[in-house]
Image (cartoon, grey):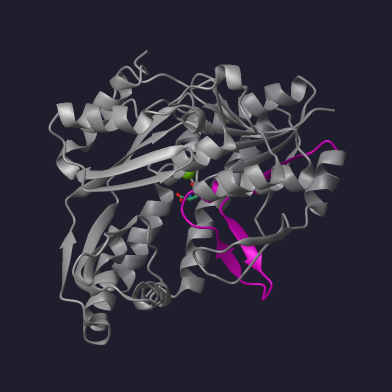
Amino acid sequence: MPFVVQKYGGTSVADSERIRAVADHIARTRRSGDDVVVVVSAMGKTTDDLIRLARDVSRVQPGRELDMLLTAGERISMALVCMALAELGVAAASFTGSQAGIITDGTHTNAKILEVRGDRLRDAVARGVVPVVAGFQGVSEAHDVTTLGRGGSDTTAVALAAALGAETCEIYTDVTGVFSADPRIVSTARRLRQVSFEEMLEVAATGGRVLALRSVEFARNHHVPLHVRSSFTWEPGTWVTEEVPVMEQAIVSAVTSDASEAKCTITGVPDRPGVAAALFRALADAQVNVDMIVQNTSLEGTTDISFTVPRTELAAATAVAESLTPTIGSAAVFVDEDVAQVSLVGAGMKTNPGVTATMFEALAREQINIQMISTSPIRISCMVAAGSADQAVRVLHTAFGLDG
Ligand code: ASP
Ligand code: MG
């Protein structure tokens, strides 16, 4: 029997009417003869509200307690979806992450899945019962409740699809799929019919908000095809799969932007072995996630190093950089928060020269200055002033013929 995992995001289960619509769709899926395992997010902005509540109550939020609090959001959704299914005569049972057998490491608020013991879910499916699993959560080997990081319900769904051998994992959301650009920025953005895991990884890592990055990694590693689609229109959405046939490959599939990072520059860095190692080891030890790094060739024995970090980690990064000044003998540390990263993603880039030139020319025509550049085989990213990011996305979308 065809077997699908369906994940419903926060907006898909935001209120009672939406929960009934979701239950209706699950019932329809069952009637069509498919086995289904459901994963739900917390209703609407529940997770944000709970985080705010925690901050109001205390300046200290031990990870273990924060996780206990946040997992409540998904428990509410799963129970309500099961009740709505009961009214439709569909046998269903809710499972917390722990009951579903999702075993994680002990890193509270950002735990990694170590193992999925899906026995209880398999039993339920075999008995004709639809398991409705609370997303975003698991249990550590020390039996503490954990969460998988923001957006973690996507990861729950993909992990269950992989462990239970589902043919597809459907991710229901409030948009109709993955777009060539954020439709709020580019009105002519088009829905992509199909993207490869590699492209989707780059999109998720550079500001595309449709799927959590980790869920895409999981899907790629375990070969789980994803279908991103709308729970408002139920129309077919975007497939995220292995390779997209070369004939269908666009040179550039999507233009993304991300204003969540800030730039840190260290000037007058001595050009000798071990300096970069000392700096980036210290940043790593301070749990700072470095993204782009640029170092110039030195002419007079010193160079400048610039790197970007999440805005939330800028203070920590700056403190590390400044504390190293005496040891490595660098001159000064500058920060710039007024930056945004604009990226082109496309598997066809690998075999088509000139993409970079076209990108730089399009930005130049708009007098948009490029502050930093980084590339992967299927991505080119430029750091620009935050204020020009939207305009940059629009001109690049046009320059690469993506306007629908
Ligand atoms: N409710 C969690 C969050 O808001 C997990 C999720 O929605 O995927 O991050
Ligand atoms: Mg989400």
Please state the extent of the stretch shown in magenta in the rendering.
Answer: 127-153
- The residue sitting at 22% across, 86% down in the picture is 326
Q: Where residue 380 sits: x, y (%)?
A: 38, 39
Q: How many marks?
A: 0
Looking at the picture, does residue 274 appear above or below residue 109? Answer: below
Name the quadrant containing residue 319. Answer: bottom left
Question: Can you name the residue that lies furthest to the top here?
Answer: 404
Q: Nearer the viewer, residue 129 or 274?
A: 274
Quadrant housing the N terminus: top right
Q: Is residue 311 left or right of residue 66?
A: left
Name the quadrant containing residue 139. Answer: bottom right
Question: Can you name the residue that lies furthest to the bottom here?
Answer: 326
Looking at the picture, does residue 40 appear above or below residue 344? Answer: below
Quadrant housing the C terminus: top left
Question: Can you name the residue that lies furthest to the left here?
Answer: 367
Question: Can you name the residue that lies furthest to the front here?
Answer: 299
- The residue sitting at 54% across, 32% down in the picture is 172
Q: Is residue 194 visible?
A: yes
- The residue sitting at 23% across, 63% down in the picture is 264
Q: Nearer the viewer, residue 264 or 60?
A: 264
Looking at the picture, does residue 72 appear above or below residue 277? Answer: above
Q: Where residue 195 sits: x, y (%)?
A: 55, 29
Looking at the picture, does residue 299 appear above or below residue 78? Answer: below
Q: Is residue 247 left or right of residue 4?
A: left
Q: Is residue 133 left or right of residue 150?
A: right
Q: Where residue 402 sits: x, y (%)?
A: 37, 18
Q: Is residue 209 visible?
A: no
Q: Where residue 363 sits: x, y (%)?
A: 21, 31
Q: Nearer the viewer, residue 8 or 321?
A: 321
- The residue sitting at 54% across, 20% down in the picture is 193
